[in-house]
Amino acid sequence: MPHRLFHLYQRKRIININANIVAAGLAALLPTALVVHIVEIQWRETPQWAFPIIAVGADIFFDVMIFFGLHWIANHWRPFRGKTDAERMALAARPPPFMIDAAMLQVERAIFSPLYYITAAGLMKLLQTWGLGAGVAVLIAFPTGMLVSRVAHTIWGMRMGRFLDHDERQRRREIAQAGHAPAPEPGAAAGPEPAGAPPPSHPAGAARATAGSGSDAA
C-alpha cells in the first residue's frame, strides 16, 4: 500500500472504521468455513441444526478478533510519521483508549446488524419474486444490506463523535478545556504596580501623623 494511501487510511476514521468492518466480515468467512468443515468431518453425528449455530459463533469470534487487529493497526500503530505537517500532526494526535473504542464500535455494529439482515433478506426475497435465482439475489442483496448498514452506522457515528478524526477530537477537547479554565481566586497575588502609581497608604502611619499634628497645635 502506498504511504499516502496508508496515511489516509490511518488519519480518516470514517474510512478506516468502515474498511475494517467490511474487511473483518469478509476475512472471517474462510476460517468460519474451515471450522464448520472440521466439525463435519470429525464429528459426523453432529445434527444439521447445529451447523448454523456453530457457523454463527465462529463467524462472530473471527470477525471480532480480525476487527480488533485492524483497528489497532489503523488507530494506534504509527510506522510512518507523514510527509506534510498536517499529516504529522494528525498522526501524532492522541487516539481514544483502544479497548473501549473497539468494544463500543462492536456494540454499535450489533445494534445495526438487524438493519443489515432485514435489508438483505427482504431485498433477496423481492429479487426472487422478480425472477432472479437465489445465488444472484444473494450477490445483490447482501452487499446492498451491508451498504445500508454502513451508511446508517456512519451517520450515527458522526453525530455521536465516534467517527471524528483524532486531531479533530483533540482540538475540540482543547477548546472545551480552555472554555472551562478556572478563574483566579479572590485575594490572589496581583502583578507589579504600574509605573507612576501613588504608593499605598498606611492607616497606622496616617493616624500617628494626625495625632502628632494635634499635639503641636496645642
Image: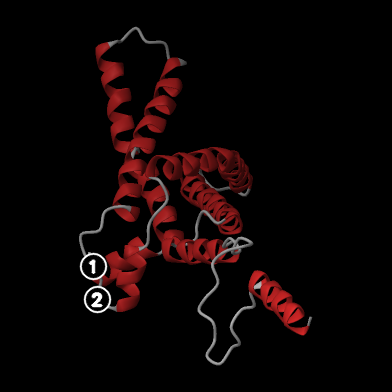
- Badge number at residue 81: 1
Height in image: 39 above or below 22? above
Q: Which residue is mark 2?
A: 83
| Viewer-closest of 156 and 27 | 156
On the image, the x and y values in percent for residue 166 come to 42, 61
On the image, the x and y values in percent for residue 188 come to 57, 64
Quadrant in which the C terminus appears: bottom right
Instruction: Say left or right for 20 vs 6.
Output: right
On the image, the x and y values in percent for residue 137 come to 52, 46
- Residue at 37% in and 10% down: 46
| SS assignment at label 2 | loop
In this view, which residue lies farthest toward the right?
218
Mark 2 residue type: Lys
- Residue at 50% in and 79% down: 192
Q: CA distance from mark 2 to mark 1?
A: 7 Å
| Viewer-closest of 25 and 47 | 25
Contact, CB < 8 Å: mark 2 with mark 1?
A: no
User: How many residues crowd mark 1 within 10 Å: few (<14), some (14–19), many (20+)?
Assistant: some
Height in image: 169 above or below 24? below
Instruction: Say left or right for 60 vs 128.
Output: left
- Residue at 33% in and 55% down: 74
Mark 1 residue type: Arg
Tell me if I can see residue 72 in this picture: yes
Answer with the quarter of the image where residue 78 lies.
Answer: bottom left
- Residue at 44% in and 45% down: 101
User: How many residues crowd mark 2 within 10 Å: few (<14), some (14–19), many (20+)?
Assistant: few
Q: How is the image coloured?
A: secondary structure
| SS assignment at label 1 | loop
Tell me if I can see residue 9 in this picture: no
| Viewer-closest of 50 and 6 | 6
In this view, which residue lies farthest toward the front?
218
